[in-house]
Structure formats: structure tokens, C-alpha cells
Amino acid sequence: MTTRESTSTLRVRLPALIAGVMVLSFIGLVAYALQRMQGTSELGVGGRINTVGTLVRFTDRAAPDFVLPDLRGGAAIRLADYRGRVVILNFWASWCPPCREEAPILREFARRYAEAGVVILGIDVWEKNWDDGRAFLDEFGVSYPNAYDTEGRVTIDYGVSGVPETFIVSPDGHLLGKYTGPVKSVEQLIGLLNELGIAPVRR
Amino acid sequence: MAHLGSGALILALILAIYGMVASLLGARRRVPELLQSGYRATYAVAFLVAVALIALVIAFVRHDFRLAYVAGRSSRDMPLHYVIAAFYGGQEGSLLYWTLVASGLGALALYLHRRSDRTLLPYMNATLLSVVTFLLLVLTVVSSPFRLLPVTPPDGAGLNPLLRDPGMMAHPPLLLSGYAGFTVPFAFGMAALITGRLGSDWLRAIRRWTLLAWTLLGLGLLIGAWWAYHVLGWGGYWGWDPVENLALLPWLTSTAFLHSVIVQERRGMLKVWNLALLLATFALSIFGTFIVRSGMLSSVHAFAVSSIGHWFLSFLALVLVVGIGLLVYRLPGLQSERQIESVSSREAGFLYNNLLLTAMAFAVFWGTTFPLFSELFWDTRITVGPPFYNRVVGPLLLVLLLLMAIGPLLAWRRTDVRLLLHNVRWPAMTGIVVGLIGLVAFSRPWAAAAYAVTMIAAGVTLQEFWRGIQARRRNARENVFLAAWELLRRNNRRYGGYLVHLAILLMAVGIIASNAFQLERQFVLRPGEQGTIGPYTVVYRGLEDRRMADAEIVAAQVDIYRGQRYAGTVESFRFFYRNYEDQPTARMGIKLVGMDDVYVVLDRWQDDGMASLRVYVNPLVIWIWIGGVVFVLGTLTLFWPQPVPALLRVPQSVVGATSEA
Amino acid sequence: MRGYQRVSRRNAADFKALLWRACAVLLIVTVAIASHGTSAVRAEEPLSPEALEIANQLNCPVCQGQSVRDSNSELARQMRQLIQQKLDAGESRDEILQYFVQRYGVSVLREPPRQGYLWLLWWGPVVGLVIGILLVAVYLRRRGESSSNGMVPVELEELERVERLLGAEGDAR
């Protein structure tokens, strides 16, 4: 009699138990997602700011070529002119704090590896006033070439969704990878290049 | 003020814990004095939280920028009403407000039910206080609104510009009250489960409290829609934004509960289901807060992302474990007293209603949370936007409206199908005619079908009113108005419910039209130039710069003509608030011409006055707001005090369509 | 260094083309300098209804839950212009959407595509509804059977339950 009753109550309870287990495992998954979640970007004044970077690899993607005016008023800058060298394409904006942290590091890298077949190209984007971009270059004494993208064609062509974002282009004009966030040190940048199979050598 | 506030919160926390323990001990050991002291603890907690809240408001009004919360959300140049409203403009203040509503309504419930539901009250009190304890713990430990700054700034940062809108005065407090209000019915439900007193006495206690929270939440959603409509500039009022969706979910499940609870009251069925809905409603309101505060989903509401997500998630898990555990434990005692006899009975109708509402809630929940799992399992970020929801929820809504047409005509236990068809014949014919005309005139099959169904439902509802009025006129010899008044007064649950149905149908009229027949154009115009959209001509007159104490304003003036006839002038604004110059906000220029809203968005402009304008024509949107007014009237009717409890008057088994809902 | 040589050889061969390109660059530079400073509404084409519709299909990548049509951000403005230019150049709606998906990933679409695991998203609500219908059907059937077949002998267990419930109801009222 008791066994019969207990099986019958189990039968009554089973659907609810299953539903309960499903609900709780959902909560568990959400908790797991919350643990894994980390803020990698925030909304800034003129767009999104990438605060924590991740390296994204590309396979078999050609780097879209572009011709953009030089921010300092020099000759236009064209990506294809840099074929044969590794190009580090850095999208930045003057109002973005991580870009400010990153600028001296990129400058230092450009100085050290000028002869190693690696060039840095900066592209200024999403500015209200391009003079802000020029002031930024002066402030950090940036000497590597910097272009600016008024119509955003290149920015969109590369799928940039936040600043800073850095693309690495192989000597034959293919996209190797992108890093969606500020580079914290010269060594880290070299590490990123190494991961993509590039070993710049100081000469 | 800061010390008064934080002291009150700490005291409230201690009292809440004490009251919880006292209630539980008092109930187990049967010590009335202990129980009494537990109830008084709740009153004291409510009082102390109110003191803390008033202290916070005073700090805002006196611009006490020593408080980080005040300095971060207000400034001296803000108008007073926004300074006061700023107290719920952030996480800490809105949690404090939530705590006040939960403990205040809880205290009120304790007082009102002090004689009628004695066995439930101790456990109801304990549940309530455990929720309040959690909130107070968060407020004192991680997210205190009374945290002081090391240095007092001369002026505050000001409120987020998006929140400086008349909608701010009503939308957040109503929505939060709705969320918090579900604590009371949840506490009663848990008390019923703990005591095992699962008859229908607890239902009487909670139906009204659920109704209250449901009304507040519904109004909050509606005002949120109105806010979005005139501020966000997409020409719509509901963007299926994750946060909107999450606020809609408890409203959907509580709507389902308010319907199915009738079945339990009248026929003693669906007990498990009702408790599950109650639990789901409360859990969803916690879940919504958790998602908003953790910033897990990208949303236009992501103002304050913080670390208290973990707290809310843990609390949610606790609520669910205890709730589901108790439900499973009590399952054998929750079997139905009666059984459904026919698939065409009113109880079956309510079952279908619940099926549709929960399916809708599930669809919205699925779409809203899916991006989370997409990123977790497939490492792919996705966006689930309005097209998904329109496609998935739209058809369900259509069937729900159809059910709204048939439901009121169903009789308890069993419906005579011939009688049903007889009763539905006039509304159905009207609806079909309307649908056919719509189909021929506009060749939009979906919109035509939706209007046909809306028409049938409205016809049936009005017919029910008319019959009720006629019956009163015959029997009580009252004139039409008096009869209508008496009908609503004496039979408020049934006819108040029908009023809410009418409100939903009026909103449906606007929703269908603005989805199917919206026009949209973009113009780049110099002052004096014009553009045409549908039957309207807009003439752009130019820009005007203005100043307010806390903002600079750019206003674009646009004349609107319908054909050749001048219909009015609107101004579409951009606001540049001090400290937030780079986040301009907007207010749209909206002109009601006939039944069309002509809606002007100022996108960009140049110093010489050339501007890029987007113009929409949104037909019949006005009916959504008219429906909102009817919704308020309907819910007021529902709250009307009844002279004699309906349950005592109505005999146990009622046959026939005239029974009361 | 092989790539470099290849490029320079090609450049030498197409010297004329390079000259043309240099002219184009010069033009771009002048235009850019001319329009520099003011956020140029002037340079903006009015968007056709079709472009607006496409913009409304796209999620603004730098915003929180706004479409490209509704966002006021710089990137969204540029994307709107690009959509219009692509439409003017004769590209179809699908080609344009595809262009953005290739660059920004599938999250740029406000309506997730019906493919791969995303079928889960689309069919989830339907499956939920079907399960709901089945549950209701089972509930109604079970109730219907046990009440209509009044002649079927009542199981002992059932009888006990009814008695217990009657007792409970008696208490409650």
C-alpha cells in the first residue's frame, strides 16, 4: 500500500520535478555566462571604446586596399604602397582614452622596428573635428604615417566597431588578424605578431 | 542626512531579520506575542525604509553633493522635479524605492488581512521580510545610496540626459512599483504552500494584490512606450529592446494568472498551475532586474551596469529552489477538485488563454535570452531585433484576440455551440465585412485579418455590455446611463475585465495600423524647402537656438500641410545638456492630423540651417493612448470595493452563460 | 620580400593607371579638406525609402540596441551613406546586407538569418507552443475521459484522493 502510494505521488511530482530541474539548469547556465562575461568595451563620446582586447585570426582574407588623405597634410596614403612589409593598421580617435594610453607604445614600437619590415599606419576615425586628431599626433609625438577617414568607407570596409582596433596585414596584402583593444606594451605587440607567425627583427 | 539614511537602512535590516525569525518561531511554537512582534517589525521596517528614502530625497533637494549618489545624478541647474526624480535615476535609489514599495505594500497587506488570514500571515510575513532582507543587504553592503565622497564637489554631474523627460516622472516609479508589488502575492503564495492551506481562501487574499502590481506594471510599460515614442525617434513605441521584453514577461505571466485564477476560484482547478504562474511572475521580475543590472544584454536601457548581478542571480536561484521545492512537495495536495467536462467550456477557454499568454511569454523569453547562449555555445554574437518578435508574437496575438472574441460567450462546464454561434453572429458578420473591405482597399491580408478579429472581439464585448444594460433596464427600470453605471459597480469583476479587454482592442487598432501602414521619408532641406510624404507636405522653416538653465536646444520648425490645407507647425528638438554635450537627446515633433501622427525627427544640421529630417506618418497611434485611458478606467472598476464578496453570493454550481467571471 | 617585388613590378607596368589614381587621390583630398570642420549635411544624400529600410535591418555596431537608421552615431551615419551609395551603384538589398555581415559578423543583422544553429532560435517558440498544446490536450483528454465514462469502476487510489479532497474542502469552507 505504501509503495503504491509513493509511486503514485512520484508520478504526480515527476513533471514538476523535470520542469524545476530545467529552470534551475537554466539559471546555472546564466551564472556560467555571467562568470565568463567580461566587459570588453564601453560606449564613448563618439563611438564604442574597446577597453580589453582579444586577438581574432583571419584566414584567407584580403586586406581591402584604400587611399586616404594624410592627417598631417602630406601625400595620400595607400595601403598597397606598403606591399612587402607587415602593416600594423591602427584605427584610433582622439577622444578615446585607451588610444591615448596606446599611442606612446606604438610610437616606441615604430621607432625600434623601423628597419624590420614592419610599419605602423594609423587611421583616425569618428572625429568631430580633425584638428583634434592632429593635436593628438603632436601631443604624443607620433611620427609614423596617419591617415583620416572622413566618410568612414575604410572603417566600415574593415568592420571596425570600436577604437582602438588594430589589424595586422601580411606582406602580400592579406589580413592575418585583428586585436580589438589597446596594446599595453611593445612586448605585447610583438607577442601578438609572433602569434600570427611574424617575427620582427631589430636591425 | 547620509548618516540618518544609512543608519535607518542598517536598523531596518536588523529588524527585518528579527521579524523573519520571530514570525517563523512564533508560528511554529504558537506564541502570539512573538507573531505580533514580527508584524510590528514589518511596520517598523517600512517606516525606516521610508525615512531613508526621504533622507535621500532631502539630500537631492538640498544638493548635498557629499553623497556620491547625489553628485553623480543631479546638478544645481536641473529643474526641481528632475532633481527629485533623480533619486530613482540610478541603481541604488531605484533599489531603495523598490524596497520601500515591497515593504510598504507588505505592511499594508499585513494590516488589511490581520483578521481574515491569520494562519497564512506569519509565513507571508516571513517570506516578505526575507525578500526585504535581501534588498536591504544589497543596499547596505554593496550598493548604498548614502556612500560619501572623500571630497565634496561644488556641483554634481547631472542626470543622464536620456532620463530628463516628463516620462521620467512616471515610467520608472510605476514599473518598479509593479515589479516590487509582485512580492506580496508571492509571499501569500509561499505562505499557502508552507502551511498547506491550499483551499481557495488564499486566492482571495492575493488576487487583488496581483491585480495592483499588474496594473502598475502595465501602466509603467504603457508610459514607457509613450516615452520611447516621443524621444527615441524610430517612429515607434515598442522596440523589443531586451529590457522592455524583460518587463513585459512578468506582465504576461500575471495576465495569465489573473485569468486562470478565476477558474480556480470558481471550479477549484489549475491550482498547481496558478502557483507556478505566481512563482514565475516573481522570479521573472527578479530576473529582469538582474539582467538590467548585470548589463548582460545590450540595450538602450544600459545606464548603470554594476557588479550586483551576482547578488540578484543568487537570490533568484534561492527563490526558485525554495519555490519549486515547496510546490513539488505540496503537489499531491494540489489536485483539482473538479474536472473539465468539455473542450468548449469557459474553463477550457481560460486554459487556451493561458496557453497563448505563456507561449507568448516563452517566445519573448527565448528571443531575449538566446543571444546569451549563442555567445556561450557557438561563440557568435547575434542580435534578435524587432523582426523576430513581430513574426513570432504577431500570430499568437492574433489568435489571442480571436479567443477574446469567443471567451466571454463560453459558459462554465459546457457551452451550447448553437447558442454560441447565435450570439456571435452579428459581431462576426461585422468583422468579416470590415476584413473584406480592408483586404480590397489596402490589399494587406495580415492587417485585414487582424482588423476583422479585433472587430469581432470588440463587437462581442460591446454586445455583452449592451445585454447587461438591457437586462438592468428591464428588471430595475433604470435608464441607460444608470444601468451602465450600476452594471460596472455591481458586477465590477466581469465588466471591469471587459473594459480592460476593450482597452487592449483599442490599442490593437493603433498597433496594427502603425505596423502595417507607417510611411517614412528622409529629406535634406534648406529653410523654406519642402518635401511630401503620403498626403502630407512638410515645409521646413529653419532652426532656432534656445537656452534652458541646464541645456542648449536646437529646434527645427516644420509646417505641416495636408494637401493645400495648413494643419499646424511642429518643433523637433535636440537637447545638449551641460556635462553631456556629446550625448544630445531629442524630442520629436509630433502633430496629430485627423487620425495620423505626423512625426518629425531632426537628424543632423549645419550652421546655415540646412537640415536632414526624417518624417513618419503613423496612422491611428492615438488609439493606443486612448486605449491606455480605458485601461486605467477598467482597472479602477476592478478595484471597486464590492459590497458583498462575490463568492458568498454565487451558488456553487452555476450553469449557463450568464454566470459571472 | 617576394610580395614587395611583385607589387613594385606591377606598379611600374601600370604607371599610367597610377597617375590617374594620384589625380583621384588629389580630388579626394581637396574634397575632404573643403568639407573639413563642419559635419557635412551638405555632402549627405537624402536617403531613399529603400535605403532607410535596409538601414533599419542593420544593428548599429557602436550603439546599444539601436538600428543604423535610428542611431545618431558617426558610424551609423557613414553606414547610411554607404548604403545609399551602394544602392545608387545598383547593388541589391541582399548584396548590401551581405557586405555588412561579412565585415561586422552576423550580429549586425537585426533579424537573425535562418541557418545553422539559428534554426533553434526560430523554431524554439514553435516547439514551445506545440509542447504547450500537447500538454493542454493531454490535460483535457484525461479530464474528459474520466468524467464522461462515469461507469468505469473508480480505482481505489482515486477514491482515496477524492475523499481526502472532500475532507480538505470541508475544512476550507
Image (cartoon, coloured by chain):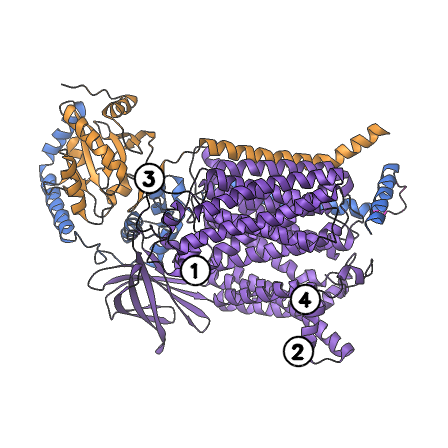
Chain colours: A orange, B purple, C blue
Q: Residues within 10 Å of mark 2 (few under 14, many from 20)?
A: few
* Label at residue B229: 1
* Label at residue C36: none
Q: Does the stretch in magenta take in C153?
A: yes
Protein chain holding label 3 = C
Residue at mark 1 shares a chain with residue at mark 2 = yes
Question: Can residue B489 be seen by looking at this rendering?
Answer: yes
Q: CA distance from mark 3 to mark 1?
A: 32 Å
Residue type beneath disc 3: Arg
Protein chain holding label 1 = B
| B610 left or right, relative to B135 | left
* Label at residue C103: 3
- What segment is highlighted magenta in the picture? C147-154
* Label at residue B495: 4
Q: CA distance from mark 2 to mark 4?
A: 15 Å
Answer whether labels 3 and 2 touch (C-beta < 8 Å). Answer: no
